[in-house]
Amino acid sequence: MEKSVPIICPYCGVGCNLEIRLNQNGEPVKSSASGRNMELNGKYLCIKGLSVHELINSKSRLSAPLVRKNKILARTTWDEAMAFAAGRLKQVMDQHGPQSIGMLCSGKILNEDAYLCQKFQRAVIGNNNIDNCARLCHGPSEVGLRKQLGYGAVSTFHEDYNTAETIVMVGAHTDVTHPVIWMWLRKRARKGEIALVLADPRNTDLVRHAAVHLNPRPGTDIFWINALAKIMYTKNWHDEAFCRTQTIAFEAYLKSLENFDVQNACSRSGVDYNDLEKAAALIHGKKTIFIWGMGLTQHAHGTDNISALVNLVLLTGNVGKPGCGVSPLRGQNNVQGAGDMGALPNLLPGHMAVADEAARIHTGALWNAKLPSTRGLSAPEMIHEIASGKIRALYVVGENPALSEPQSSFVSWMLQRLDLLIVQDIFMTETAKLAHVIFPAAMIGEKEGTFTNAARRIQFTSGGIAPLKGVKPDWRIIADMAGAFGFEWNYSSAKDVWEEVRQQAPVFSGVTHDRLKGSPGLFWPCYDEKHPGTPRLYEDGFAFRDRRARFFPVSAPENLMEATDTYPYVLITGRLLGHFNTGEMSRRSKKLMKGNPEPFLTIHADDAKKEGIDDGELIRLTSPYGTLTVKAAVGRDVTPGYLFGPIHFESANFNTLMSAVPHDPQARMPALKIMPVKISKSL
C-alpha cells in the first residue's frame, strides 16, 4: 500500500514540515505539505520543498565507500574504507600531533550527527578544530548576539510575526531565501497590518511591499544604522526606561553618538536622510522585529554590523516582548542545530564556552575524556593553515568548501595538498572529488532524529524510507570511526545519541524524541520534561548574571570594498528561489533546474550599454583574485555600478573571485558578499 513519511525539509532554516509519498515499491514519488504543523508552514511549501523526493531519488547519489588508489577513487567495502581512514588519521597524529587535524561539519545533518562530529574531534582527535557552515553566513550574528543578549540565536517565533507592527529587514531577499516566512509577512503587508522598512542595495521584488526602501551602498550599513539611532534618540523616540533598567553601557553608547555626523553618514552610505526619518517614525512606539540576512553579515566588519543593529534594537526596547525581537535568517535547515551541538571552535554543546573549566569538566566526565581548553581554528583558518603545514588532514562531513569558501581555486589547491582528506556526503561534490576516502551517507527520510530551525524550534524528522543500499546514517559512521580508534560508543540509534545530548546540555534536557513526535516542536531552552520550552527569549531578562543586555558602541569601518579605476564595478553575490547554496542538492532536481538552468550575471541596462554588452552575451568577469566567464543578464534589478551573481553553479563559481582576507576579527567571517571587479567581452 502507498504510504507517506513525515520529514523536515532539508533546505532552508524555516524548518517546514512535509510528507514524502511512497509508491507500492516504497519509492519516493511526491513531496507535499500535509498541514500537520500549523505553527510553521501549514499547507504551504516553496518550490524547493516540493522537489525533495527528486533529491532522494537522484541517480547520482553515493552508494559505496571509495578509497583513492593509484590516484583513482575506487569502490571498496566499509571495513576497508574505515581501516584506511582511521589508519591514515592515526599516522598523521603520530607524525604531526592532534592539532594537525581539523573537521568541517554540515548545517544540513541531524543534531545527533553534528553532536557526534564535535565529540569525535574533541574526545578522539583531541582538539577544538571543528567548525560548521555558519562561519560563512551567520557567524557574526552568533558572536554579536551572544555578547550583547546572551544567546547567538533568534529571539522571536511565529506568533511574533503575527503581532508585530513594523518589520525592519536588512540585507535579506526573504521571498527567495525563506519563502514561507515572506508568505506570512506579505499577507499582513497587503492588508496594511505591518509596515516594512527594507534596507537592500538591490531593487528586488520586496521593494513594492516596502513602506520605506533604504538603498545603501553595500558594506556601509553601520553608517546608516548609527544615523537612524541618533535620529531616534535626538527626537526622544527611544525607550529610556528600558535602556536604564534592562541594559548596561547605555551612557557609553550615547557618548559614541554625540559627535556622530548624520549627514555625513547619509552621504557615505547613499541613504536619503528623509527616508531615515520615515523609518524612524515607523519604528517609534511600534512593536518591531529586526530581520537580517547575509547582506549584513558577510563582511570583514560583519560583527560590528550586527552590534550596530542590536544597539538600535536595545535603544528602541524591541526585544523580549510580544511582537518584537531579533531574527537572523539562517540559511540551512540545521545550521542553528550545528552550533547548538557544539560544532564550533569556541563552544561546547549547549552554548557552553570551551574556556569554561566547569563546562569542560562536566562534558569530559560524561565522555570519559579530558577536553582541550584552547579555542580551535575556524574553517577559513584551517584552509589557510594547510599552506603552513599546521593542518595535514581534514574530515569534511556534508560540506563543500571547494565551492563555498572564498578564493575557491586556492581552496581546491590546498585540499589537494593534504596528507588526508576524508569526505562524508550524499553526492560526489567538488570537494569529494579531491578526497582520499569517501563515506556515503544516508539522506533525509532514510534516518530519523532531530533538526533545529532558525527560531530554535527542535523538531523530529522520521526515517521511514528504506536507505539506499550501501549507505549509513552520519551518526553511525562517526561512531564507527571512533570505534576504529578504540573508543566504545555504544549507540544503537539516534535516540541514544540524543539522550546523551540531554545529559550534557541543560538547555535541551527537557526535549525528548517522544515529546517531539507528533508535536509542532519544542523551543530551547527547555530544562525538564514538564517545561513547555521557550518560544520567545529574554522575557525574564537576558542571559547574563545581571540579566541585562549590553550596548556595544561601534565605529564605521575606515576601509570598504569599493570600486576603483581598475575595478570599476562591485559584484554582489546572493541566492535564487529555485536553488540552494553550492547547488549540489538543487541542481539534481529537474523541477528546480527548469527555472534557472545556468549561471548568469545581472548588469544594469545603462552599464551594459556603456560596455557594449548584449543580454545573453558571454562576458569575462575579473577580480583581484580570479576570472570567470558567464552570461550577461541585462536588467534594472541592480543599481548602476553594481552586478549580481548567484552562488549555486560550479561552472561559474563567483566565490572564485572573493577574498579570504581581510576577515572579521571577531567571527572569522570572510568578506563573501561583495568584491570590486571589472568586466569585458569574452574572447
Image (cartoon, grey):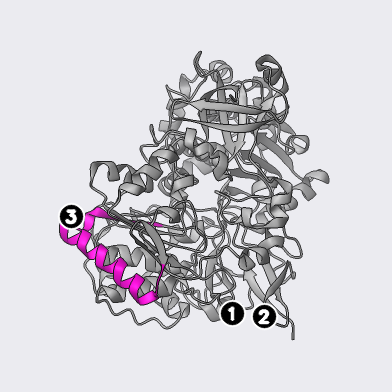
Residue 445, percent from left and from top: 59, 72
Magenta segment boundaries in residue numbering: 75-104
Q: Nearer the viewer, residue 192 or 567?
A: 567
* Residue at 56% in and 37% down: 295
Q: Which residue is mark 1?
A: 466
User: Is residue 270 found left or right of 428 in the rendered image?
Assistant: right
Residue 593 visible? The answer is: yes
Which sits earlier in the primary sequence, circle 2 or circle 1? 2
Q: Which residue is mark 3?
A: 96
Q: Are marks 2 and 1 in contact (CB under 8 Å)?
A: yes
> Residue type at mark 3?
His
* Residue at 58% in and 44% down: 649
Residue 24, percent from left and from top: 73, 83
In the picture shown, does residue 49 fall above or below 579? below
Residue 250 in magenta? no
User: Is residue 230 found left or right of 610 in the rendered image?
Assistant: left
- Where is the N terminus found, in terms of image quarters? bottom right
Distance from the alpha carbon under mark 3 to that under mark 2: 48 Å
